[in-house]
Amino acid sequence: MVEFKLMIMKAFLCNYFSFLNLSAISKGSISVTQSIAVIALILTLLYICFNSTSVYLIDYVCYLPPDNLRVPHSHFIEHFKLCNFEKETIEFHTKVLEKSGIGVEACMPESVHELPPDNSMKHAQAETEMVLFTIVDELLSKHNVHPKSIDLLVSNCSLFCPTPCITSTIINKFGFRSNVKCFSLSGMGCSAGLLSVSLVKDLLKVHKNSLALVLSMEAVAPNGYNGNTKSKLIANALFRMGGAAILLSNRNLDKGIAKYKLQHLVRTHLGSKDKAYQSVYQEPDENNIVGVSLSRSLLSVASSALRINILNLGPLVLPYSEQLRYGLSMIRRKIWAAEDKEMYVPNFKKAFEHFCIHAGGKTVIDGIVENLKLHREDGEASRMALYRFGNTSSSSLWYELSYLEAKGRVKKGHKVWQIGFGSGFKCNSAVWKCLSDIDPNVKSAWSDRIHLYPIEIPVFDC
C-alpha cells in the first residue's frame, strides 16, 4: 500500500513539474511563488499518503450475571440426569466439565435452569436483551454519552440472528439517531469480537470524527444440544452467558480520556481448507437434533491458524533481533533440511506486556501458552476469566483485559495482545497500547471479588 501511494505521488509530481516547465527550473528562473507551491504540494501529498486515522478505545463494560444464575457442576449433572440423558452421555459431560477449567460461579440464562430447559426464541431474545441492555446502559451512562451521539453501531452474535436484527433492538431501546450506521454480524464464531473491531476500524477511515459502539455476545439459551453425539456435547459444558460493550472513537478530543489506542489488527482465515472449515461445524445429528461439533483436529487447526497469523503480525511488533533469529531458524530448516531442529519461537515478551488468549477451554489456553513459549502467569487472565465466567465466546477477551486492569497490572505504555479464535476457521490478533495508567478500583465485572484471584484450578485425574 505504501509503495502504491509513493508511485501515485511520483506520477503526480512529475506531471506537476512538467506543467511548471522543467526547462525554466533548470535555468534557475523558477519564481518564489512556484517554489512555495511545490513545497506546499509535496507536504500536502505526504500528509494525505501517510496520515492514518487513529482508533481509540475509550472504555468497555463486561456483563456481570446475577449470582442466582450460577451453575455449579453438581447442578449441571443433576439437570442432565433429570432430563433423562443416557448414562454414558452424563459420564462424558462430567469428564468434560472437570477438565474444562470452569468454576462454580459461571452462569447460564434463566431458561436453562428450567426443567426441561426452554430453548425457544422468546428466551433467546430475553437473554440477549438482558445482557446488552445492561452493558450499553452502563457504558453510556458511565461516560455521559447520549445514544444519539453514536455514529456507528456493530453487534456480533454467532448463533442467534433474529428479525429485526440485534442492532435494531438496541436502536429501538435507546433511541439512536435515524442515520446511525449499523451492522449485525452472525455465524462468525468466537473470533467475531475482533472482527467487529476490524469492521469499525475500516469504517472510521471513512467516517471522520465519529463514535462507534461494538456489542459482543453469544446467546446460550437457544443453543443447548439435547442429543448424544460426543463432539456436539462439548459445547454444552463450555459455553456460559456473558457479553461486552466497547466504545471506540477516531476523534482527537477523545485521546485524552481513552484507555487504549489500536496499533495493529491482523486477521487469518483458513476456510479454504476442509479440515479447518469443518473443525467447528453446526449440523444435525443422525436424529436430526442440531448442535455444534468440535472436531478432534480443532487444536491443531488453531495452532496452524495462529502460526500464519503470527507470520503477518510478527514483523509489525517484534524487534529486529527476534525477527532475524526466526528468519535464520527458518532458513536453516529449509536449506539444510534440519527436520530434527525445532523452529525458533520469537520471544513475544519483548513485544507485549500482557496476553489475552481466547478462553475457549483450559486445553486451548495451555496449548497456546506452550506453543508461544510464554510463562504460566502470562495465561493467568485467560484461565481466571474461564474459571469465573466460562467460555463467553467473542466477549471473553474483554473479561480477560478487565481482569488485568482490576489487578492493577496495566500501565501507561504497556501493550496488550488479544488473540481470538473462531469457526471458519479464523484467528485474529489485536494489539492495543495503553495510553494512561488504569485505575484498578474503578467498578468492573471483577470488582466484587478480584481479591480472591488468582486461584489454583482443580486438576482431575480422569
Image: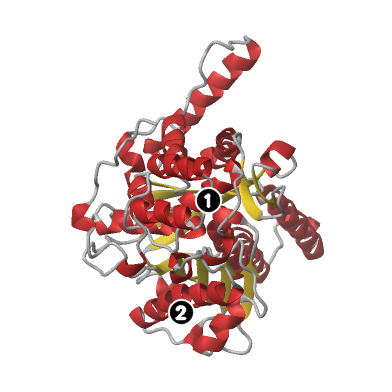
Going from the N terminus, do you reach mark 2 or mark 1 first? Answer: 1
Give the Cα separation between the discs numbered 2 and 1. 35 Å
Tell me which residue sits at (32%, 49%) in the image. 384
Q: Secondary structure at mark 2?
A: helix
Residue 98 appears at what percent x and percent y? 38, 41
Q: Which residue does the numbered mark 1 point to in the structure image?
A: 85
Tell me which residue sits at (57%, 67%) in the image. 119
Q: Is residue 274 left or right of residue 159?
A: right
Q: Is residue 51 left or right of residue 444?
A: right
**Looking at numbered disc 2 in the image, what kind of residue is underneath it?**
Phe
In this rendered view, identify the residue nearer to me: 186 or 261.
Answer: 186
The quarter of the rendered structure image containing the C terminus is: top left
Q: Is residue 448 left or right of residue 228?
A: left
Please tell me whether residue 359 is drawn above or below residue 303 in the rendered image.
below
- What colour scheme does the image use? secondary structure
Q: Which residue does the numbered mark 2 point to in the structure image?
A: 133
Residue 241 appears at what percent x and percent y? 45, 63
Please tell me whether residue 310 is drawn above or below residue 449 in the rendered image.
above
Q: Secondary structure at mark 1?
A: loop
Please tell me whether residue 122 is drawn above or below residue 90 in the rendered image.
below
How busy is the neighbourhood of tag 2: few (under 14 within 10 Å), some, or many (20 plus)? some
**Looking at numbered disc 1 in the image, what kind of residue is underneath it?**
Phe
Tell me which residue sits at (47%, 32%) in the image. 320
In this rendered view, identify the residue nearer to me: 53 or 332.
Answer: 332
Residue 80 appears at what percent x and percent y? 47, 53
The reply to whether residue 94 is in sight is yes
Residue 447's disc is none
Residue 252 appears at what percent x and percent y? 45, 73
